[in-house]
């Protein structure tokens, strides 16, 4: 799983978000990539008022403030194949978790 944070230097919300991601990464393995929005005019135009922006496997997941419990829950859902809500209200279905792991007695 690839988690990407769009940020820029001297952004206190970005530093807080990176700290949240680092703590979550201690419990859930993922690759963390950081992109400075100043490196691309397109990224700067898109995100300059919304940083930090966090994507998970290319899907925009969080903007501005990150709550550690919400980030962890989102990543666990993404890892285990449950449906996750996109920012624009659409849903993307990921592969489902096997019944033996779910333990709920239902298929898929």
Image (cartoon, rainbow, N blue to C red):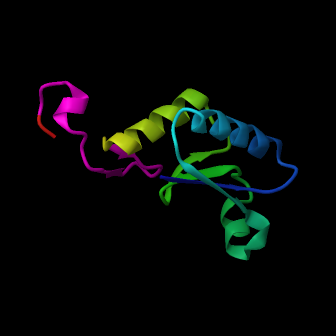
Q: Is residue 45 above or below residue 3?
A: below
Q: Is residue 75 above or below residue 2?
A: above
Q: Which corner quadrant of the image does residue 69 belong to?
A: top right
Q: Which corner quadrant of the image does residue 96 belong to?
A: top left
- The picture places residue 70, in percent across and down from the top left corner, at 52, 32
Quadrant that contains the C terminus: top left
Towards the viewer: 24 or 71 = 24
Q: Is residue 61 above or below residue 38?
A: above
Left or right of 108 on screen, residue 92: right
Left or right of 8 on screen, residue 25: left
Which residue ends up furthest to the top in the rendered image? 104
Which residue ends up furthest to the bottom in the rendered image? 41
User: Is residue 71 highlighted in magenta?
Assistant: no
Left or right of 77 on screen, residue 108: left
Towards the viewer: 102 or 84 = 102
Which residue is painted at 79% across and 67% down in the image? Answer: 38
What range of the chain is rendered magenta? 83-106
Which residue is painted at 45% across and 52% down in the image? Answer: 88
Would you say the magenta stretch is mainly helix, strand or loop?
A: loop
Which residue ends up furthest to the right in the rendered image? 10
- The picture places residue 6, in percent across and down from the top left corner, at 68, 57
Which residue is painted at 68% across and 68% down in the image? Answer: 43
Q: How many marks?
A: 0
- The picture places residue 99, in percent across and down from the top left corner, at 17, 33
Which residue is painted at 79% across and 57% down in the image? Answer: 8
User: Is residue 103 highlighted in magenta?
Assistant: yes
């Amino acid at each position: 799983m690839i988690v990407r944070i769009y940020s820029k230097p001297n952004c206190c919300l970005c530093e807080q978000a990176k700290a949240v991601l680092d703590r979550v990464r201690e419990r859930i393995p993922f690759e963390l990539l950081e992109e400075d929005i100043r490196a691309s005019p397109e990224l700067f135009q898109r995100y300059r008022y919304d940083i930090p922006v966090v994507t998970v496997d290319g899907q925009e997941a969080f903007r501005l403030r990150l709550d550690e419990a919400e980030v962890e829950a989102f990543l666990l859902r993404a890892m285990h194949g449950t449906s996750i809500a996109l920012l624009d209200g659409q849903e993307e279905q990921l592969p489902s978790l096997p019944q033996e792991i779910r333990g709920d007695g239902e298929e898929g």
